[in-house]
């Protein structure tokens, strides 16, 4: 008997999410004694702020199931935070706390009978989630001219043949995989309103905008925007698994459905984590955040400058920890490298540099485009350095970011010897 028949067709031969896979492969190579530069998984390099850790310890005894929507105090402070950042009045009754924003976005996709609209490229998991749910998926192309973001022109063109009553669009800025911001949010909001497009605004990196700006489409279209966020990126707590969705009152109907689904699935997020998370929203984290931004910008600029120097086309990142790189100017397709996946494999084998192919983000594989996450450094050490210094000089770079420095320089010298000599 073929055991695959036990599974729904869409789960047969399913593989784990590619970002987790690259991390597993990298760890295996490290265990075998190889030197690996981990530019694959986008995990925050920074420690969780001390006050959150202390509060977590104090709340280890919290053992009861909490409200499905989340701890009331936490929902109150999340609603207050987003009311301030997103310039709209959000109620704690329209906030839901979940085990990571990934799960909450999935639940939101599950309860809404709307086709999914995605800019190409988009974060790895939106599309597989929709596939699991058998949701219709429509991609819209972007280009370097609009920072690889959905442009108003592209959305307007797409909407000319609009045959749907409602659609669900996911926007993410600062963006994974591109590291850039969407500069057309206001124009996009008008088109979304006209075409009944509901937006999930994935704001998981918004606190890591290098200039400290908080841009959101909710500033122009609050009534049609669901805000997705959480602790994973800006406060280094990916493994704590706490995400949030904040709904405007106009979308209460979706909120109620997600809440009902949550009650039948994850019940509630770990109680001690929720008690500790309150401190993420009530304490002043400006020093931690300003320093995190300065550090990330320094690393982003280094990676951008180094890669651009040899003709790899990329856009200077504006926030978060990613950069999208187009190798097509320096590498022509050949017998070994004929798509981005083989490019990533060759680079990993020859240099130990792990990165992800663009196809994981919806980009055609024949395009030699990859995503790098520049987080392979000791965030604790870098933050301590910033306590005594206002900026990071070039002379300090290798001491603070040895794997970034070495990884990028090794990659460059391999590329030069293989393709540029
Ligand atoms: C764009 C984006 N959205 C959402 C997530 C999910 O974050 P979490 O589930 O940890 O809240 C990630 C994580 O990598 C991400 O990059």
Image (spheres, helix red, strand yellow):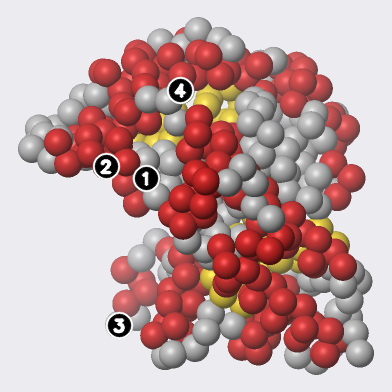
Query: Residue 140: percent from the left, percent from the top?
Result: 77, 44
Quarter containing the C terminus: bottom right
Where 45 sits versus 365, above or below? above
Q: Are marks 4 and 1 in contact (CB under 8 Å)?
A: no
Q: Which residue is mark 3?
A: 1
Q: Which residue is mark 1?
A: 48
* Mark 3, other Cα within 10 Å: few <14 / some 14–19 / many ≥20: few
SS at mark 3?
Answer: loop
The mark lying in front, picked from 1 and 3, is 1
The residue nearer to you, when weighing 140 against 244, is 244
Q: Are marks 3 and 4 in contact (CB under 8 Å)?
A: no
Q: Which residue is mark 2?
A: 53
Which residue appears at 57% of the width and 67% of the height?
399
Q: Are marks 1 and 2 in contact (CB under 8 Å)?
A: yes
Q: Which residue is mark 4?
A: 246
Which residue appears at 17% of the width and 41% of the height?
57
Which residue appears at 49% of the width and 49% of the height?
383
């Amino acid at each position: 008997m073929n055991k695959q028949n036990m599974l729904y067709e869409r789960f047969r031969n399913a593989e784990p999410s590619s970002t987790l896979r690259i991390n597993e492969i990298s760890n295996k190579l490290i265990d075998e004694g190889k030197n690996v530069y981990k530019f694959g998984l986008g995990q925050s390099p920074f420690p969780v702020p001390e006050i959150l850790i202390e509060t977590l310890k104090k709340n280890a005894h919290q053992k009861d199931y909490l409200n499905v929507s989340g701890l009331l105090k936490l929902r109150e402070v999340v609603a207050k935070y987003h009311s301030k950042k997103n310039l709209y009045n959000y109620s704690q009754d329209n906030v839901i706390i979940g085990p990571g924003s990934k799960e909450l976005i999935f639940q939101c996709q599950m309860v809404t009978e709307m086709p999914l609209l995605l800019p190409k490229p988009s974060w790895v998991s939106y599309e597989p989630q929709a596939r699991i749910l058998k949701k219709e998926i429509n991609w819209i192309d972007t280009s370097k001219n609009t920072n690889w973001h959905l442009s108003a022109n592209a959305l307007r063109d797409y909407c000319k043949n609009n045959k749907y009553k409602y659609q669900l669009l996911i926007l993410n800025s600062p963006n994974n995989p591109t590291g850039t911001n969407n500069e057309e949010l206001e124009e996009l909001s008008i088109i979304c309103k006209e075409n009944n497009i509901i937006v999930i605004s994935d704001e998981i990196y918004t606190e890591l905008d290098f200039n400290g700006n908080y841009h959101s489409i909710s500033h122009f279209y609050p009534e049609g925007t669901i805000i997705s966020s959480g602790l994973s990126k800006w406060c280094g707590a990916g493994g704590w698994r706490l995400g949030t969705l904040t709904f405007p009152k106009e979308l209460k109907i979706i909120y109620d459905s997600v809440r009902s689904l949550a009650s039948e699935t994850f019940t509630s997020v770990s109680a001690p984590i929720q008690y500790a998370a309150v401190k993420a929203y009530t304490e002043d984290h400006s020093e931690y955040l300003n320093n995190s931004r300065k550090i990330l910008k320094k690393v982003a600029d280094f990676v951008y400058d180094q890669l651009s120097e040899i003709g790899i086309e990329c856009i200077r990142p504006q926030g978060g920890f990613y950069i999208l790189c187009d190798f097509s100017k320096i590498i022509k397709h050949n017998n070994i490298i004929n798509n981005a996946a083989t490019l990533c494999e060759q680079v990993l084998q020859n240099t130990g540099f792990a990165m992800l192919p663009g196809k994981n983000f919806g980009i055609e594989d024949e395009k030699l485009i990859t995503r790098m996450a520049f987080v392979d450094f000791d965030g604790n050490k870098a933050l301590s350095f910033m306590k005594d210094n206002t900026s990071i000089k070039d002379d300090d770079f290798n001491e603070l970011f040895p794997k970034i420095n070495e990884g990028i320089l090794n990659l460059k010298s391999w590329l030069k010897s293989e393709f540029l000599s």
